[in-house]
Image (cartoon, helix red, strand yellow):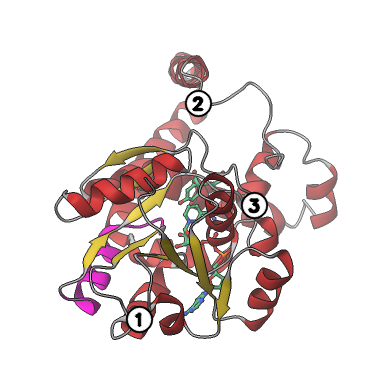
Amino acid sequence: MLPFARVAIIGMGLIGSSLARAIRETMPTVRLTVSDGDPAVRARVVALDLADDVTENAGAAVVDAELVVLAVPVGAMAAIAAEIAGELAPGAIVSDVGSVKARVLADLGAALPGVEIVPGHPVAGTEKSGPDAGFASLFQDRWCILTPAVAGPASDRVAAFWTRLGARVELMDAAHHDRVLAVTSHLPHLIAYSIVGTASDLESVTRSEVIKYSAGGFRDFTRIAASDPVMWRDVFLNNKDAVLETLGRFTEDLVALQRAIRWGEGDTLEALFTRTRAIRRSIIDEGQDTEEPDFGRKH
Ligand SMILES: NC(=O)c1ccc[n+]([C@@H]2O[C@H](COP(=O)([O-])OP(=O)(O)OC[C@H]3O[C@@H](n4cnc5c(N)ncnc54)[C@H](O)[C@@H]3O)[C@@H](O)[C@H]2O)c1
Ligand SMILES: O=C(O)C(=O)C[C@]1(C(=O)O)C=C[C@@H](O)C=C1
């Protein structure tokens, strides 16, 4: 039996449109109604035939949905929740795909009293945005972390939904999620934005030279640094404490490396690099990645 027969998605960019495509592929009888604030996105959704209905307003999309998934930037979740509050069907479950969870759990809880809320985060994505960038296999064999205030029948149904889409589901405390993702996702993006910005600012390294010689490690950073500016602005503003804590520790470790280079402490450098190489190999051994460089996932 399907976990949900009628689903609404608000926000049809990379993640919302991937979700729509994955639903179409794995649960073709689900009635899918979607909405997006941008008329150009709505037009693309119609042209790509990604849903049964496309509505101008979020409220109109949710009226008979059993599951509503908010797939907008984290900073827009509260406004959407307020917009749909009076329109939800009795018993509807509201979820989301935001990259930050404690803020979203608080925002949705405040705007939707009495509604079953099951925040979620598929840990899968690319540096691209918009409905044309989505693809059905995005969530296949990837983690989807659910962070409900309390586990129960609602989170069981949302877990069954993501399992059906091919994801591996884990339940987690929202604040813990934000600390983990600050290390594994948010800080790496901040470093990429920073390093690419620094390189292009350096007077002796002109923009064209950066592009010309970026075949190596720097190219990986440019892919990450091409990620959506609004989405990532909202991630950092809404996971401020965990990111600042992680950044503090990172800065200390970076200064320790700076000292090791200055004082010629080769053993210190070699010991760290040996440890980090082992970490990369253990990720590959666990089948989470390949040795192939990932200059934009092929799909
Ligand atoms: N990009 C990733 O790799 C990734 C991965 C996992 C989760 N996420 C999360 O998924 C969410 C969506 O990210 P995305 O990459 O799909 O972004 P995106 O920019 O591709 O799509 C966001 C869509 O939301 C719409 N939107 C924004 N504000 C709106 C509003 N107030 N009302 C209606 N529509 C609105 C935009 O028009 C856009 O079409 C974010 O919360 C992000 O943190 C992203
Ligand atoms: O592969 C990428 O391009 C991503 O940035 C994906 C990534 C990540 O950092 O792992 C980015 C943000 C999300 O919230 C989840 C996944």
Please give the label number shown on residue 210.
Answer: none
Is 44 within the magenta? no
Q: Residue at x 61, y 23 (%)?
A: 290
Q: Residue at x 50, y 21 (%)?
A: 280
Judge the density around disc 2: few (<14), some (14-19), many (≥20) Cα neighbours within 10 Å.
Answer: few
Q: Is residue 287 left or right of residue 120?
A: right
Badge 3 element = helix
Q: Is residue 102 left or right of residue 123?
A: left
The earlier-in-sequence mark between 2 and 3 is 3
Give the quadrant of the N terminus.
top left
Q: Residue at x 46, y 77 (%)?
A: 61
Q: Disc 1 marks which residue? A: 84
Dominant secondary structure, magenta = helix
Between 292 and 205, the one lying in front of the other is 292
The earlier-in-sequence mark between 1 and 2 is 1
Q: Give the amino acid type for the residue marked by disc 2 in the picture.
A: Gln
Between 48 and 292, the one lying in front of the other is 48
